[in-house]
Amino acid sequence: MTETIKHECGIAMVRLLKPLSYYQKKYGSYFYGLNKLYLLMEKQHNRGQEGAGLACVKLHARPAEEFIYRERAMGAGAIQEIFANVKRQIRETPHDPADAEWAALHLPFAGEVYMGHLRYSTTGRSGLSYVHPFLRRGNWRSRNLLLCGNFNMTNVDEIFNSIVAQGQHPRSYADTFVLLEQVGHKLDMENQKLYDRYKQEGLAGIAITEAIENNLNIADILKGPSQIWDGGYVICGMTGSGDMFSFRDPRGIRPAFYYADDEIVVVASERPVIQTTMNLSVEQVRELKPGECLVVNRAGRMHIEQILEPRNYSACSFERIYFSRGSDVDIYKERKELGRHLAPQILKSVDYDLEHTVFSFIPNTAEVAFYGMLEGLDNYLSEQKFIRLRSAKSMSEEELRHILSLKVRSEKVAIKDIKLRTFIAEGDTRDDLAAHVYDITYGTVKPGIDNLVIIDDSIVRGTTLKQSIIKILDRLHPKKIIIVSSSPQVRFPDCYGIDMSRMGEFIAFKAAMELLKDRGMQSVIDEVYRKSKAQQNLPKEQIVNYVKDIYAPFTQDEVSKKIAQMLTAEEITAQVEIIYQTLEGLHQAIPNHPGDWYFSGNYPTPGGNRLVNNAFINFMEGVDNKRQS
């Protein structure tokens, strides 16, 4: 994706199941868990570059000593900053590196339960107070709650109103704050229920405390609040007494993976992250299923509990196309398949002239799809060679050598100049600098003769294409420039964790609107606005996605041609064409992740229809705001 889309926070959790002295003896450090957390977070750096945070719970801290430690920081270097702060606190506390028992009682961050988070804001809110983990304090360890997650709730208003109706007074309207108060309230109620029960049974003092800490029912705490949650989420939590959980939404929109043995339980947003950190095979890492919750209690017993029944399975396909690490065995294959499925459209575009076509990719995240595209083209070329050789009655040595020498021409055409920064300039000056963000490899294309095909993983806004990429590619003077997107046209906003909430940002939407105006079909726009406005105050379950009608009159090719026209500046001399993946190709390449609402408008939850309805109204009324939740 040539324009970076903010997205998909990353989560990491570690629960040590043995005393710290065990890890000191076996691995040489009682910070074994903290070191694993660092690796899990660093390996997911792609999922959050606006902030990071970590938290630690010590199971054996004594009264008057801290039992919860937390560090948070802002910026691209947040991971290094928070771990540097942790090391500083450890260094400033006199201790014996070999005394694990003393460390378990007194040393900061020498604990058994860890939580890490990487943040990408999808709401427009920023600042340290919005960086996870969030902490809800209490005087009883079992009433303390730490919460982090990879989620966006579409119905924050409903959740907010429900807890206000119970008498609570949330300090913020953001979904993380609201969920913290909602779950925290249920945690308080569970504590009180257990307190009343054990007091009636004759327990008192520390005995009640220990009984409560050893018998918290995390599933019961989550079942009530989650009934009204609408969104995509993996929500992770820890209590101050040592319970840990990770809970995935019932539609499986957001991903979560875990590994457990008799030493450790590990949770993360991506499978290869756990594989690399723990040196595991792909079969050893399991995926948390929709509606499931992984729970590890204070005693270290892990179990999986079905909190919500699975609903229409809608695992996010954008995870596979762009966001997740391509080192995952399945994602790597899927991205190659996305590229391979594009080969027929590309061949048609270049009139099957592979001798005079050069293939490349921008940016690096599109490289795997590029390999798949080459495989598809190679398969076609091999078949053509076979047909020509088999059908020839006689052939000269020169003709034979020519056929055998035919190959798909691939080059590294564009290289991003990472040293160039455009933020220091404004207006036209900034646009001029943006046109130089990429360097080109001169001599790779025969001027006026060769076609140039560039594959990208997705084209959402088209801004970088117009301001930079197409302009620099045109300097090579190809006969034709074909920009290929391994994903379909992004037509609808997201509401489950990707920073794509404004209709006016999508080049496909702009193209469809222009086509309607070009063809005298302004009435379609007016009618969609009228119907959207009429249902604005209806319950989310009754809202229909009428924005689909904006695209209905046109084929994908018609929209693509309009996009190419809109992204081609006047000074461009080459013919420009845009090719997008089809929805059918997407689902064939990624069959196990059917969530495609940003392409199709088929939202898996009612809150999605409400979002797209409001986004279109905001566009029509000139309100350029992001969804606040």
Image (cartoon, grey):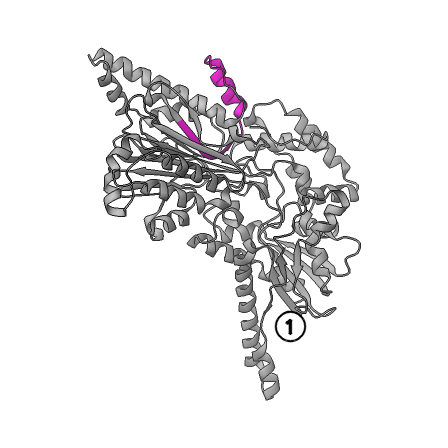
Residue 451, given in percent of the width and then of the height, sits at: 68, 65
Is residue 338 in view? yes
Residue 378, given in percent of the width and then of the height, sits at: 54, 68
Depth check, front residue: 231 or 170: 170
Q: What residue do we see at 73% from left, 65% from top? A: 479
Residue 499, given in percent of the width and then of the height, sits at: 58, 38
Above or below residue 478? Residue 92 is above
- Horizontally, residue 623 falls left or right of residue 58, namely right
**Mark 1: secondary structure:** helix
- Membership of 239 in magenta stretch: no
Answer with the quarter of the image where residue 508 lies: top right
Q: Which residue is mark 1?
A: 355
Q: Which residues are magenta?
A: 146-170
Q: What residue do we see at 40% from left, 39% from top? A: 87
Residue 187, given in percent of the width and then of the height, sits at: 37, 21
- Horizontally, residue 612 falls left or right of residue 562, namely left
Above or below residue 407? Residue 459 is above
Above or below residue 144? Residue 515 is below
Q: Amino acid at mark 1?
A: Glu
